[in-house]
Amino acid sequence: MQPTIEQLRSFYQMSVRISNLLRPINLVRMDERTKRIVMLVGETIEIEIYPNGEVFTK
């Protein structure tokens, strides 16, 4: 399964923002069931990137 162009753009933008804050990205995974990219940042921040590129932070 490949991410959409919109997901890749959002993933790049989030990665740059996170690295500017000097936070570690511990996990990046593509959920095949929901077609979302999931990022675990630090110990507690979870980011989901939807196929349309929308970003949701928990």
Image (cartoon, rainbow, N blue to C red):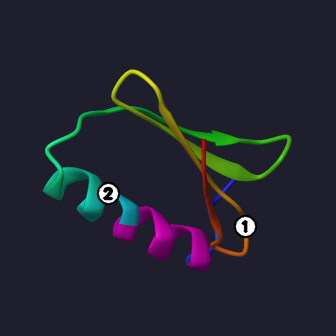
> Which sits earlier in the primary sequence, circle 1 or circle 2?
2
Left of 31 or right of it: where is 30?
A: left
Q: Does the magenta stretch mainly form a helix, a strand or a loop?
A: helix
In the rendering, at what x and y percent does residue 22 appear? Answer: 14, 44
Left of 43 or right of it: where is 6?
A: right
Q: Is residue 48 above or below residue 4?
A: above
Label 1 sits on a secondary structure element that is loop
Quarter of the rendering containing residue 5: bottom right
Q: Is residue 23 above or below residue 11?
A: above
- Residue for badge 2: 15
The span picked out in magenta is 6-13
Q: Are marks 1 and 2 in contact (CB under 8 Å)?
A: no
Q: Of 44 and 1, which appears nearest the observer?
A: 44
- Quarter of the image containing the C terminus? top right
Label 2 sits on a secondary structure element that is helix
Left of 38 or right of it: where is 32?
A: right
Left of 18 or right of it: where is 8?
A: right
Spatial CA span between label 1 and label 2: 17 Å
Mark 1: few, some, or many residues within 10 Å (few <14, many ≥20)? Answer: some
Residue depicted at 71% across the width and 62% down the height: 50
**Residue type marked 2:** Ser
In the rendering, at what x and y percent does residue 43 appear? Answer: 39, 21
Quarter of the rendering containing residue 23: top left
- Residue for badge 1: 51
Task: Based on the picture, tell me whether residue 7 belongs to the magenta stretch.
Answer: yes
